[in-house]
Amino acid sequence: MNIINKFKTIFSNKTYKQLVEEDQEMVEDPLLKAVIAGEEIDRDKVLMIPAVSSAVGLICDSFAMIPFKLYKKSTKDGRKQTSEIDDNRVNIINYDTGDTLDGFQFKKAICEDYLLGKGGYAYIKKTGNDFVGLNYVEERKVVFEKNTDAIFKNYKIIVDGKYYKPFNFIKLLRNTKNGAYGKGYTEEISKSLETAYKRILYELDLMKTGGNKKGFLKSQKHLDKEGMETLKKAWNEYFAGNSSCLILNDGMEFQEASNTSVENQLNEKNKTFDDEIKEIFHIGKTNESFIKETIMPIANAFCTALNRDFLLEKEKKSYYFAPDYTELMRGSIKERYEAYKIAIETGFKTRNEVRYLEGDDALEGLDLIDIGLGSVLLDPKTQQIYTPNTNKMVKMGEKTEENNEINTDNKQITQNEQNINQDVEGGEQSEE
């Protein structure tokens, strides 16, 4: 039984609460106070945990770095094409939101709400059918009025007492079951975060007391009220670092409070908490795995929300938002150049397209695609085969000119052989 349980067995709940209210100095340990008060972990306390604050900061900064672009799907001459669209909505998302937050700050804020709160929310500002801004709204300011139909779900969004339709907001939600709000890590792993937070308080208390051991004072004789006040004052002065020593009167001794097995297990658990947080947030591995496992799901969720509510109904069949991971996955200069070499040699990109990615100007003559002389190209629609090395195109299954010439020569040879045989037979005399 640890110190907390000992307190609870000595006093009933009611008596103990009254005792704490009458004399708060009896309970100076912040960890003990937190447990007794039964305070729940909230977002502000979660961000006081270094491992969590670091992980959330890294994820939100990485997400905020991603530029989101608008694309249009079309068909030309029977071939599908995708082109990037220069639209004001791209500027709103990435640069000027029309709100007090710029694009980077907006994406970082909405991502943090996604991770730790019930979701990220932004009000869509429109003038007619024109999108003119995105106003970030703190998730704690957003409440809902839902219907009770389990199949045909519907809800209204309430902010500062005003009602809004769901399509008035961009909603970035994690682990949602109703499309209105989700579940953040603050709620999902609340007990683990609560334990870590109380460990921070415990360590803070140790720093305040200079690392002095905790324990109990045992007195063989009864102390009057004046003696108790004098002892507590001297005790607090010592643990606050204002006194270098504490003199105990005759018949009074200090007994150290040893850690119980449960407390030792908690201490051991706290040593692995940082690793657990990295595992939860998929941090500490390679940059590629971090982007794939952590950043991409958030970016895809954000694009899905944009495609649903930041496009007009008539645009949804051909327009879509997508993230550009180029900056996050640039890697070292050696890695980039090796990737560019492969892209050029395989005909995936031209040299000028590569120069554009590196911020260089285009040069004349570098817009050609390198397909290699050894390639044989097939058009699956026309079934035509083109061989660059011989500069000839044929249709699959048809004979080439060389084959026709060979066939013609073979026919001529066969005809000559037949003529020779006929001449031989005609010159022979019958013995009869």
Image (cartoon, rainbow, N blue to C red):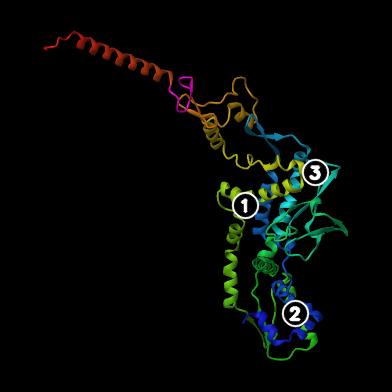
Task: Classify the position of the C terminus by image quarter.
Answer: top left
The relative height of residue 405 versus residue 173 in the rendered view (above or below) is above
Residue 97, numbered circle: 3
Q: Which mark, residue 33? A: none
Q: The disc labelled 3 sits on which kind of residue? A: Thr
Q: Regarding mark 2 in the picture, which secondary structure is present there?
A: helix
Disc 2 crowd rating (10 Å Cα; few below 14, some 14-19, many 20+) is few
Identity, as a three-letter code, of the amino acid under mark 2: Met
Q: Is residue 267 left or right of residue 224?
A: left
Between the C-alphas of marks 1 and 2, the distance is 46 Å
Which residue is label 2 attached to?
26
**Residue 60 in view (yes/no):** yes
Instruction: Give residue 210's quadrant in the image.
Output: bottom right
Segment colored magenta: 388-399
Looking at the picture, tell me which residue is in the foreground, 73 or 336. Answer: 73
Rendered location of residue 345, percent (x, y):
51, 29
Disc 2 + disc 3, Cβ < 8 Å: no
Is mark 1 in CB contact (under 8 Å) with mark 3? no
Which of the two discs, 2 and 3, labels the residue nearer the N terminus?
2
